[in-house]
Amino acid sequence: MSGMERTTDEWQRIDVEHHLHPFTDPRYFDKKAPLIVTRADGMHVWDSSGRQILDGMAGLWCVNVGYGRKELIEAANRQMSTLAYYNVFFQSATPPQIELSRLLAEVTPEGLDHIFFANSGSEANDTIIRMVRHFWEVQGQPDKHVFIGRKLGYHGSTVAATSLGGMQNMHAMGRSLLPGFEHIMHPHWYLEGGDMDPDEFGLKAARALEDKILELGADNVAAFIGEPIQGAGGVIDAPRTYWPEIERICRKYDVLLVVDEVICGFGRTGEWFGCQTYGVMPDLMPMAKGLSSGYLPIAAVAYNERVHKVLKDGGLFSHGYTYSGHPVACAVAIANIDLIRRDKLVERVRDDVGPYFHDRLKAAVGDHPLVGEVRGKGLLAGVQLVKDRDSRTLFDTADNVAMRVRDLCLERGLIMRAVGQSMVASPALIVKRAQIDEMADILADSLNAAAREFG
Ligand code: PLP
């Protein structure tokens, strides 16, 4: 039996018995059953009981064009029947991979004209670690190998990507912090800025990079990596002074600048890429998620002419994945980018739904006693939960307030995600104003219910 027609109880029982959920405490299922999602369309998913739920997270920050888009489905079907697989190792190439390389060179910021393909954001970042260290080795500077990331940064969960990121719980599991990775403070003004004004704090947070480079010696530092907005850290957007100062410091000490666009890329912040929202120019840029709107796994690294020239001089590039440049995934990514362009989704986020989303969230929950800050850009928002607004005091982590608010939202038909003590949202770029209203109202109602429980 294929198992596609079981009852919800059966699915839940089998899932708990045989499947380990990523980033989940398995004991959760001693008390609650997993949500079984059976279909999706537009902005909604349906669970196995037939209940319709508004997806405020676009899956895992990835379904930028919404669910069920026939253009992507047809592209996959067509490519699957023409050439379901061939690799791009050695001296081979395929038309979808060639066409997507060209298209990515066109939509990424000017100067990032060279592309390497992977299957996930983690793999893209692993690629960057090997590529950047190779870049310095080829130039006779093998000591320039240390990567500097940030506290609460997230760059994936392979061992190397875990090391790039600044999540302490991830480092602690399985001795996953490799040597050669350092982390500096993250630019969260609300919780770290104290009495400083945001611009002054932005400069201070950026200068932690300079201090770290001087401590390690610039001759040992290969690259700095950061997400334009820290997504999995709780949607933390830096003050406007931060990124230009980071770029200045990287240039001064000849440290490569890697901007991780896995969440922010493909329109989420109201520009094609988050680095454009903040006015910085990376040397290398990993992308995934919105590249195919999650319809198939695919990731890419875009890099500039300087890196390209050195890689060319470096000879054999001993790196790659069986599914690098998978033709079906590339065909879907092309259809996805065409759709984002045709429907002007980036402009829509910048000029219409992005500002509306933040105005509406602020109006609905900005003054709520449990809310300290509503932050983010475009269709990316973080709502900081606090026990006391005046002193910016957080709840005890054991209270699990954000998880409770998440559950209350789900009971009311909305998927939002709890990250630490923040609620985060990243709806698809096709979200309608009425659906933003619904999100804001359900969140406010859930916060009221939580305030009664935790007040
Ligand atoms: N980089 C960032 C900024 C991410 O948010 C993520 C995933 O959420 C990753 C990398 C890892 O991507 P993946 O889960 O596809 O490996």
Image (cartoon, helix red, strand yellow):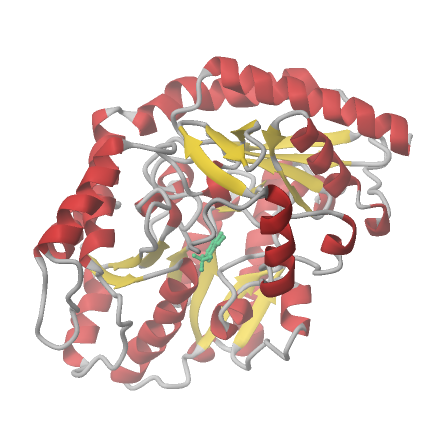
Residue plotted at (46% across, 24% down):
354
Residue plotted at (51% across, 74% down):
159
415 versus 135 height, above or below:
above
As rendered, which of 217 and 181 lies closer to the eye? 181
As rendered, which of 173 and 125 lies closer to the eye? 173
Quadrant assignment, res 42: top left
In the rendered image, residue 403, in percent from the top left (x then y), is placed at 73, 42
Quadrant assignment, res 372: top right
In the rendered image, residue 342, in percent from the top left (x then y), is placed at 21, 26
In the rendered image, residue 351, in percent from the top left (x then y), is placed at 38, 19
* 317 left or right of 133 in image: left
As rendered, which of 89 and 373 lies closer to the eye? 89
The residue sitting at the front extreme is: 1
Quadrant assignment, res 348: top left
* 188 left or right of 144 in image: right
As rendered, which of 344 and 257 lies closer to the eye? 344
Residue plotted at (57% across, 28% down):
51
In the rendered image, residue 432, in percent from the top left (x then y), is placed at 44, 17
Which quadrant, please, contains the C terminus? top right
157 versus 267 height, above or below:
below
Examine the rendering and report whether any part of residue 256 can be seen.
no
Residue plotted at (62% across, 20% down):
440
Examine the rendering and report whether any part of residue 46 can be seen.
yes
Which quadrant, please, contains the N terminus? bottom left
